[in-house]
Image (tube, rainbow, N blue to C red):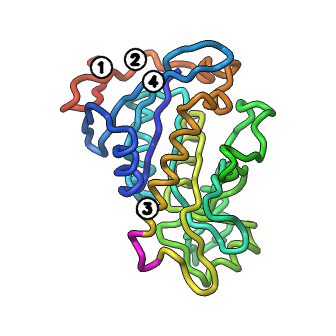
Amino acid sequence: MDIVVLISADAEWRAVKEILTPNEISTSPLGEWFEMTFNPSTSFGVYLQPFTFYHGGWGKISAAATTQYVIDHFDPDLLINLGTCGGFEGRVARGTVILVEKTIVYDILEQMTNADEAIAHYATEIDLSWLGESVQSSVFSGQSSIVRGLLVSADRDIMASDIPMLIKKYDAIAADWESGAIAWVAKQNGVRCFILRGVTDLVGAGGGEAYGDYDLFIRRTREIMQQLILLITDHEWTWIVPSSSLQPKRQRRPSRARRSSASAGPQLPDG
């Protein structure tokens, strides 16, 4: 099974490289990437599972462009996005991991027709049925919970004044910059998409605890990324890709993109 892991923000990517310490990092027109193979020991036996980690960049523009790029060049069976998000104070606990079921891009301002229709156009329901019934809200490692829910996205940090509206209109608990774009592009291509976002900091009426304190965000980002990487690569990883779902869901392209030299990045085949 071919799995690509998109990492969005620069701080998240730096943390991933520090945690995984890849031997070789390749470049592409849109971002760095590297491959790593993990050997999870499960009840189904011991096997090797390769992952391609790709730096998707921050914001909707980079997220959409790199999502399409990795789909075209790596042809993944599963696209995973790991990253951080800001939580709404009183709605979610710091450290909670959100398994995203739906994304909404809320920073669309439409003054000629109906803004709700424009927002609905980019809203994305993520099909997680292939995960199996065993994936429910639960506690991992006795530390942080993982919950299934909705994530709202915008090209900006959470504004405290927006929180009441986001709660009332969407029942939102957290927000990020990229998930909405990634989920939408993946769905248009018919590619399985799986998003895990960890809450690094909370925002409330008094503002955000990480606003003006970038060092705090960096420290918590590394903690969250360490947790997310363990969730998809250690012996527990089959909760994400159960044995019954290891076969590709969609039909393979006739001409599969091939990875060539590290300096050139992934290249399309001739003809």
Q: Residues within 10 Å of mark 1 (few under 14, many from 20)?
A: few
Q: Residues within 10 Å of mark 3 (few under 14, many from 20)?
A: few
**Which badge, 4 or 1, comes first in the chain's sequence?**
4
Q: Position of residue 148 (x, y in %)?
A: 72, 50
Please tell me whether mark 4 or mark 3 is closer to you in this view: 3
| Type of amino acid under label 1 | Pro
Q: Residue at x 56, y 33 (%)?
A: 191
**Which badge, 4 or 3, comes first in the chain's sequence?**
4
Q: Residue at x 38, y 49 (%)?
A: 13
Are the two marked residues, 4 and 1, in contact with CB atoms closer than 8 angstroms? no
Q: Is residue 82 left or right of residue 149?
A: left
* Foreground pick, 270 / 155: 155
**Which badge, 3 or 1, comes first in the chain's sequence?**
3
Q: Which residue is mark 1?
A: 269
| Type of amino acid under label 3 | Arg
Q: CA distance from mark 3 to mark 1?
A: 42 Å
When the figure is inspected, residue 19 is found, relative to residue 153, above or below; the finding is above
